[in-house]
Amino acid sequence: MDMQIISILIITGIAIISPGPDFAMTLRNSLRHGRTSGLLTALGIACGISVHITYTVFGLSFLLLENAWILNSMKVIGACYLAWIGISSFFPKTEDQTEAVTKGQSGTLTSLTAFKTGFLSNALNPKTALFFIALFTQVISPGTVLSTQLFLGLFIALGHLLWFSIVALLLTHHRLEKIILKSKRTIEKVTGACLFALGVKIFFHSN
């Protein structure tokens, strides 16, 4: 295998497991709404990669580099979204909703909403945007064939799906469930605070 591809795979693997908005979103939805919501969030995150694959493979990454306001706009939108999700983690839930979560159900979060939160978390994540721009404009040469670029994009998407699915499964494993449930609200609030802090940090760094 080409050393260029090996380097990209290693860099991608490290980037995927690094804690960030996607991890926090998976953590939040898994604890708050159950395993199914966590897995659907992971699927949404993986599909969100398609947004970044599209603009990098078709050369839009160069447009983003030349027009900083586009990337800054993405940062602002993503920051506001993360901040709102973080704040919502502090909203109290009804007794019935809490009971549903303790039984491993998805509460009031629909399958589409769980998927959408994961998708938007990744698609609007400036960290992922910057990663793709750096990867495809610096590591991959202009001579890299389209099939190789698409393969790498698919690998990155599947890597996200695998990792965040594992996170969701571990968080909702029956052996860990009792331990996690005891401190579930605390973890939710800490995760929400982290999402809010990330949003605020991204917002001010975009100006």
Image (tube, rainbow, N blue to C red):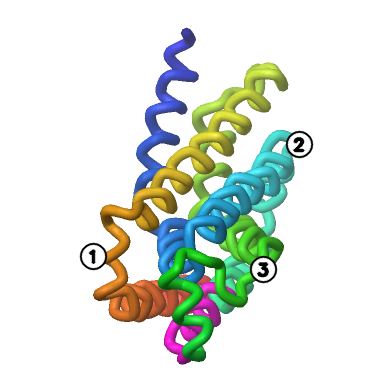
Q: Compare residues 158 and 200 and report the one nearer the observer.
A: 158
Q: Which residue is mark 2?
A: 58
Q: Which residue is mark 3?
A: 110
Mark 1 is on which residue type? Ile
Q: Which residue is rendered at x = 48% and y = 10% of the image? A: 2
Q: Nearer the viewer, residue 188 or 60?
A: 188
Q: Is residue 95 something that shows in the picture? A: yes
Q: Amino acid at mark 3?
A: Thr
Q: Position of residue 45 (x, y in %)?
A: 58, 52
**Residue 4 in the image: above or below residue 167:** above
- Residue 117 is left or right of residue 15, and the answer is right
- Region of the chain picked out in magenta, as a range: 81-92
Instruction: Tell me which numbered mark, 1 or 3, is placed earlier along the sequence.
Output: 3
Say above or below: 152 vs 193: above
Occupied quadrant, residue 68: bottom right
Callout 2 environment at 10 Å: few (<14), some (14 to 19), or many (20+)?
Answer: few
Task: Report how far apart the C-alphas of labels 1 and 3 lie in the structure.
Answer: 26 Å
Check residue 125 for magenta coloring.
Answer: no
Q: Position of residue 37 (x, y in %)?
A: 55, 60
Disc 1 versus disc 2: distance between alpha carbons?
47 Å
Which numbered circle lies on residue 179? 1
- Which of the two discs, 1 and 2, sits closer to the camera? 1
Kind of element beneath mark 1: helix
Q: Main secondary structure of the magenta part?
A: helix
Name the residue nearer the viewer: 172 or 79. Answer: 172
At a point 51% along the width and 90% down the height, the residue shown is 94
Are the residues at dot 1 and dot 3 in contact (C-beta closer than 8 Å)?
no
